Amino acid sequence: MRFRLRYLHHDLELSEGEFALGRSADCQLSLDDPLVSRRHALLVVARESVTLEDLQSRNGIAVNGQRVAGRVSLQDGDTILIGSQELTLHLSREAAPRDLMGVTQAGRLTLPKIAAVGWVSNERPTRPATVRPPPEPASSDPGVDTGTERRTEAFNLLGGVADKALALGRAEEAERLLATALNEVVEASRMGRHPSPSLVDVAARFAAKLATATAKGAWADYVIELYDAQGRPCPAPVIDELYSAFRKVSAIDLPRLRGYVAHLRERQATLGPAEKFLLLRIEGLERLAALR
């Protein structure tokens, strides 16, 4: 029997083990809510059951609207309230995804143990499920990417788990986790759907981290393609990560990078002082890539 947790239109598959919830970045699901304690609650997932335990939180937990204390068994469809955040437990008929990481009762990071988190495809319901934004509302302008906040939120949720994998030296796990989501952003750009600047910045930041961790130039090329399509300089944190990546990767698409720099130079007169400084740093990346 498989279980999944529904939160903010996202589906998280629960593998057997412990799944911590709270504000702390060490939790498998980090809830940005001042009413939530750092380690607020613990889901204990067994083959045939799930229990929820209140970790002596400040504001407690409620199940189906009723305040509970200690440990309680959960059933399919039970709604959990932690702070102001509502989550729902469901049975899942999906195949179990690859486990990525967990937290022991002592709070020490381990691999693997708990749930995997990734993009869910509504078009292919038999695909291993994890996290994906809900369907986007229709837009009168087909070139506008709607649902930005939800997409960015989902990406940050994925990224939190990927960051933990990277910190533990599990670059391949982080890459598997993020690849589908990153590809969807760049495909939207290629099809003229214009991903929002905020979503591009999030995607580019994680792609640059993957470039550094995996030493794959394709992820650095990914970043350049996204910002070239948007016609703007990469933000400083992404440039910083690209400098780290460029010193490790052996193959950068130099013509693509030079084209991006040329496009920025063409509109240099419209750039503000901060953007002009970013352009100078991107030109430095071009020189660094040319030396490799």
Image (spheres, helix red, strand yellow):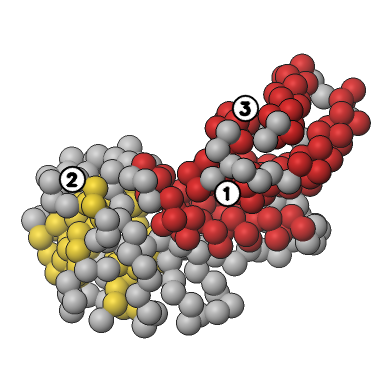
Foreground: disc 1 or disc 2: 1
Quickly name the residue at label 2: 107
Cα separation between marks 1 and 2? 32 Å
Quickly name the residue at label 1: 216
Specify the label residue 236 is tagged with.
3
Residue at the (55%, 74%) spot, across then down: 122
**Outermost residue, top direction?**
273
Would residue 92 be found to the left or right of residue 275 on screen?
left
Secondary structure of the residue carrying tag 2 is: loop
Secondary structure of the residue carrying tag 3 is: helix
Foreground: disc 1 or disc 3: 1
In the rendered image, the quadrant that contains the C terminus is top right
Q: Which is nearer the N-term, disc 2 or disc 3?
A: 2
Neighbour class for label 2 at 10 Å: few (<14), some, many (≥20)? few
Question: For the residue marked with disc 1, what is the amino acid?
Answer: Lys
Q: In the image, residue 201 lies at what x, y percent?
A: 62, 41
**Can residue 252 be spotted in the picture?**
yes
